[in-house]
Image (cartoon, rainbow, N blue to C red):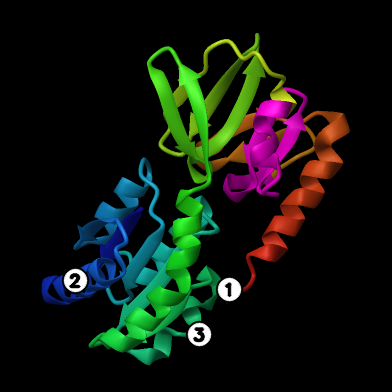
Amino acid sequence: MRIAICDDNPADARHVKELMEQFLHAHQYAAEIHLFLHPDELLATMEHTRFSLYLLDILMPMVNGIEAGRSIRLLDRTTQIIYVTGEARFALESFDTNPTTYLLKPVDAPKLFATLERIFPRLSAEETRVITVKSSKGLRVLHFSEILCCEYRAHTLHFTLFSGAKLESKYLSQSFSEYIAPLMETGEFVKTHESFIINLGYLTHLSPTTATLKGELKVPVSRNHYAAVRDAYLTSRLGTGTRD
């Protein structure tokens, strides 16, 4: 699990990091904490690294926390965002980024811990959702959230990952449908073609012939699958409107 903290005030950033470390230690959770003192650094890292949780200051130079949150939502509609700020007036403006919660500085440990206790079981469950791929370099375990799309070609699987990396499996003895069943059961993946599935969380645009994913990746949509893809996409969008 990866956690990103972004705050241009080093003292505030360290304070939140220390609280996160206390929580992780007390609950025996394993996670990497990445500290960013400028939103540009975070946005650049997001191009190749996915985070399960973001703790964002709002008042930052050049790109404020709400703008950063909007960029995060373009890449990942399911990740958790917690805003940490010294001013309450931005709460309404932050609503369109669907934050988990909104905390005022100085961060109150009990309030932060109560939020983390609520969302961490969900984050931990996300980390167990994996699929194993046999490649020429050995076994590779992929988290569902890492996968943008998968193409079945010549009895092999060709994955495109969130990081932009490609992964090709060895010869597949079972059928494509059998192999991808765990992914399809989540409702977060959909077939766009008999030989393609995509992660709906990274779908940015849909036409009757093409699905466009994060990073402008184009995947073909067949006539027979378009209606199902459209309906699944609309359902997924409605499903991200609220959080517990």
| Marks 3 and 1 in Cβ contact (< 8 Å) | no
Kindly identify the amino acid type of the residue bearing the numbered disc 1.
Answer: Arg
Expressed as whole percent of the image width and height from the top left, the position of residue 235 reads 75, 58
Q: Is residue 64 shown to the viewer in this render?
A: no
Expressed as whole percent of the image width and height from the top left, the position of residue 126 reads 50, 53
Q: Is residue 185 magenta?
A: yes
Looking at the figure, which quarter contains the C terminus? bottom right
The residue that label 2 is drawn on is: 13
Q: Earlier in the sequence, mark 1 or mark 2?
A: 2
Crowd class of label 3 (few under 14; some 14 to 19; many from 20; radius 10 Å):
few
Kindly identify the amino acid type of the residue bearing the numbered disc 3.
Answer: Leu
Q: Over which residues does the magenta segment extend?
A: 178-205
Q: Nearer the viewer, mark 1 or mark 2?
A: 1
The residue that label 1 is drawn on is: 243
Q: In the rendered view, tell whether residue 141 sits above or below residue 58.
A: above
Q: Residue furthest bottom?
A: 88
Disc marking residue 224 = none
The residue that label 3 is drawn on is: 92
Kindly identify the amino acid type of the residue bearing the numbered disc 2.
Answer: Ala
The reply, left or right, for residue 190 in relation to residue 118 is: right
Crowd class of label 2 (few under 14; some 14 to 19; many from 20; radius 10 Å):
many
Q: In the rendered view, tell whether residue 34 sits above or below residue 205.
A: below
- Helix or strand or loop: what does disc 3 sit on? loop
- Helix or strand or loop: what does disc 1 sit on? loop
Q: Nearer the viewer, mark 3 or mark 1?
A: 1
Q: Nearer the viewer, mark 2 or mark 3?
A: 2
Q: Nearer the viewer, residue 60 or 194?
A: 194
Q: In the rendered view, tell whether residue 10 sits above or below residue 103.
A: above
Q: Is residue 78 shown to the viewer in this render?
A: yes
Which residue is at 69% across, 57% downward? 236
